[in-house]
Image (cartoon, helix red, strand yellow):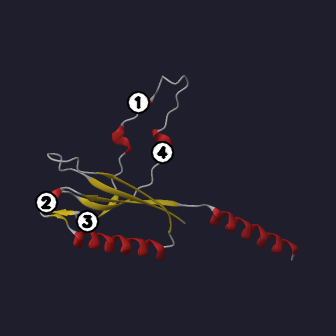
Amino acid sequence: MKKIILMAVIVTAGLSELKAQTEFKIITVIESIVPGGLGRSRIIENGTEIDYNQFTTERTDGKKSSQGKIKRGDAKVDKFSETKILNFYSMAGINFQNVASNDALATSMLNDLSKQGWELMTIAAGVESDAGKGDGNGLFITRYIFKK
């Protein structure tokens, strides 16, 4: 009987240790601010696990680096999902219907991930805006970082 109780304690401790490990996920939303609907706006989710250690080197004297031996193309993943969303601008300027539509799509994504057990941990956002006459380029990027 003592062996059974001991085994149950060990199994329970092992399961709680497995549960204690945290998993992370990043979803990126890129919303174009290129006028006329010419931009490409998407929700991007990585579908491939990759080990960052394969692309990490160390400098010993602050100058010599082995980064030249690492090919950028090797870091690219082939499997990811993309959800088409709308651009912020139309020919007439900012399109508020597009903004509301993108909010609805992002809300749908957030609700779905919550149902899957993902907890929104933090959000990071940035913008590269139109620099004035002749630029016509820009994007708004939001990274949603989840854990479970």
Q: Going from the N terminus, do you reach mark 4 or mark 1 first?
A: 4
Q: Residue 21: percent from the left, percent from the top? A: 61, 61
Q: Going from the N terminus, do you reach mark 3 or mark 2 first?
A: 2
The nearer-to-camera label among 4 and 3 is: 3
Q: Residue 102: percent from the left, percent from the top? A: 29, 69
Does dot 3 land on a helix, a strand or a loop? Answer: strand
Depicted 134 relative to depicted 32: above or below: above
Residue wearing tag 1:
69
What amino acid is at disc 3? Lys
Query: Disc 3 versus disc 1: distance between alpha carbons?
Result: 36 Å
Residue wearing tag 4:
52
Q: Going from the N terminus, do you reach mark 3 or mark 1 first?
A: 1
Residue wearing tag 3:
84
What amino acid is at disc 1? Lys
Query: Disc 3 versus disc 2: distance between alpha carbons?
Result: 16 Å
Q: Is residue 38 visible?
A: no
Query: Disc 4 versus disc 1: distance between alpha carbons?
Result: 15 Å
Q: Residue at x 50, y 33 (%)?
A: 57
Q: Residue furthest front?
A: 132
